[in-house]
Image (spheres, helix red, strand yellow):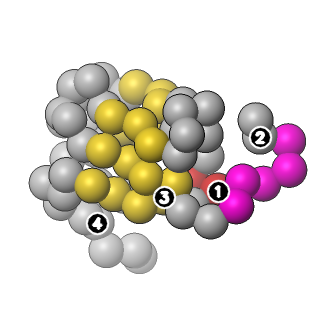
Amino acid sequence: MAELKENTARIIEVTAKDLPLHCPTPDMVAWNSHPRVFLPVAKNGGEALCPYCGTRYKLTGPLPHGHH
């Protein structure tokens, strides 16, 4: 079983395998800390900010084919 992460990081790096991206992510301890919101990180220049908790997500690496 994967270790759960605390929902306290303010900047989280994500990769193409994490798309479509939503916050909170399933591997966070407080996965139900606020309503799930999908974040358009690929369309926003590789960054997205969660409107509920303020966590900033940064996309690293290339996008998979089919994502715009």
CA separation, marks 2 and 1? 9 Å
* Disc ID at residue 14: 3
Q: Which residues are magenta?
A: 62-66
Q: For the residue carrying disc 2, how many other residues have a C-alpha within 10 Å: few (<14), some (14-19), or many (20+)?
A: few
Label 2 sits on residue: 67
Q: In the image, which is nearer the foreground, mark 2 or mark 4?
A: 2
**Mark 3 or mark 2, which is nearer the start of the sequence?**
3
For residue 34, side relative to residue 45 (left or right): left
Tell me where residue 57 appears, x and y as whole percent. 38, 48
Decide if residue 4 is in sight here.
Answer: yes
Query: Which residue is at 18% across, 33% downward?
Result: 53
| Mark 3 secondary-structure assignment | strand
Secondary structure mostly seen in magenta is: loop
Tell me where residue 12 appears, x and y as whole percent. 33, 57
Label 1 sits on residue: 16
Quarter of the view holding residue 47: top left
